[in-house]
Image (spheres, rainbow, N blue to C red):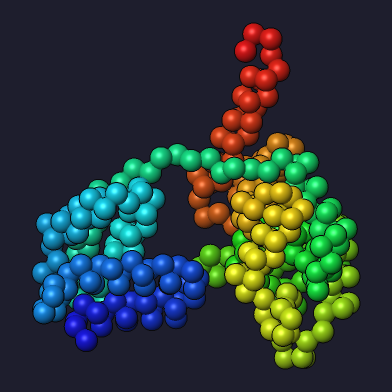
């Protein structure tokens, strides 16, 4: 294995030791694998990291531009390389992070598509009605109630363990990005759905996961996505709805009801307030839409 390839493997191993989410590690592994292949011409190995100067990195980024990749994808790939070079500096392999000299592509401001309160409640109520006659309707309802009632990421939902539940106080201990823990309250309907599910949850005593599949093992994020898509397609007539749609709805509906932005930031587990502020733009866009439809002078 080349020196560059070995160092990439060491970087990914360090990310896993630091409890970085598996999704992020997988994305970085793919991006850095492409980075390694770009600098590995046919019949030759890649250069040592010390030879990857700013000019070489700009040529690599220019090739990505020529492929017509979106600004969001370019930013992700550049973030992976910058993190890798930061690791090389920390390990004493490089004196400076030359990847920091690359200009970050500007991404367009996009607003998430958000379900209305009526749409979100209609879908959750339809799941409660057990119209699809699924094998685990009680579990599925608890999943929907927590997604919409707590604004959890899908990884946070499937990562819940039994000892993370405070049923008396109605609190969840949630492990977010970077394994940062936060406390999230859950509403009465979610508490009722959880109690009903826990009463019928049958697994071995060694399984700590709250949500399990038909084999009694921890439910995966892919499994939850499949469950949400099934119900959204057949009950909500909208297959584009996914678990994160409920997180967007949770934040937007809280904001519309008067919750302050700092509180929403804490509930969502956002490291930066700017990440939460996109929901103010969503609310303003909805407000303008209502105005355009309703005001006689619009």
Between residue 195 and residue 17, name the one nearer to us.
Answer: 195
Q: Tell me the residue at 77%/66% (across/down).
A: 140
Quadrant, the N terminus: bottom left
Q: Tell me the residue at 69%/65% (across/down).
A: 227
Q: Is residue 152 left or right of residue 40?
A: right
Quadrant, the C terminus: top right
- Residue 163 location, quadrant: bottom right
Residue that lies at the very extreme toward the top in this rendered image: 297
Is residue 210 visible in this depiction of the protein?
yes
Q: Is residue 129 left or right of residue 74?
A: right
Question: From the viewer's perspective, is residue 2 above or below residue 292?
Answer: below
Is residue 266 visible in this depiction of the protein?
no
Between residue 88 and residue 109, name the one nearer to us.
Answer: 109
Q: Is residue 182 left or right of residue 118?
A: left
- Residue 252 location, quadrant: top right
Q: Is residue 66 left or right of residue 280?
A: left
User: Can you give x and y, in whole percent of width and height, for residue 5 in the image?
Assistant: 24, 79
């Amino acid at each position: 294995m080349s020196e560059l390839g070995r160092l990439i493997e060491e970087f990914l191993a360090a990310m896993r030791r630091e409890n970085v989410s598996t999704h992020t590690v997988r994305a970085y592994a793919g991006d850095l694998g492409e980075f390694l292949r770009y600098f590995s011409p046919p019949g030759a190995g890649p250069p040592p990291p010390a030879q990857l100067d700013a000019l070489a990195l700009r040529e690599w980024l220019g090739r990505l531009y020529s492929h017509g990749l979106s600004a969001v994808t370019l930013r992700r790939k550049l973030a992976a390389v910058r993190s890798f070079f930061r690791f090389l500096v920390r390990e004493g392999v490089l004196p400076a992070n030359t990847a920091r000299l690359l200009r970050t592509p500007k991404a367009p401001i996009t607003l998430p598509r958000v379900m209305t309160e009526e749409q979100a409640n209609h879908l959750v109520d339809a799941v409660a009605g057990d119209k699809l006659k699924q094998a685990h309707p009680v579990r599925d309802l608890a999943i929907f109630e927590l997604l919409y009632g707590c604004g959890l990421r899908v990884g946070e939902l499937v990562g819940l363990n039994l000892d993370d539940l405070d049923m008396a106080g109605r609190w969840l201990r949630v492990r977010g990005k970077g394994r940062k823990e936060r406390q999230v309250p859950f509403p009465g309907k979610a508490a009722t759905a959880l109690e009903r599910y826990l009463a019928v949850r049958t697994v071995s005593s060694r399984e700590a996961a709250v949500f399990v599949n038909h084999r009694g093992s921890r439910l995966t994020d892919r499994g939850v996505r499949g469950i949400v898509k099934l119900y959204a397609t057949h009950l909500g007539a909208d297959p584009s709805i996914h678990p994160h749609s409920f997180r967007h709805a949770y934040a937007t509906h809280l904001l519309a009801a008067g919750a302050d932005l700092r509180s929403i930031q804490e509930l969502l587990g956002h490291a930066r307030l700017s990440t939460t502020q996109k929901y103010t733009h969503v609310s303003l866009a909805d407000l303008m839409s209502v105005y355009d439809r309703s005001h006689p002078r619009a």
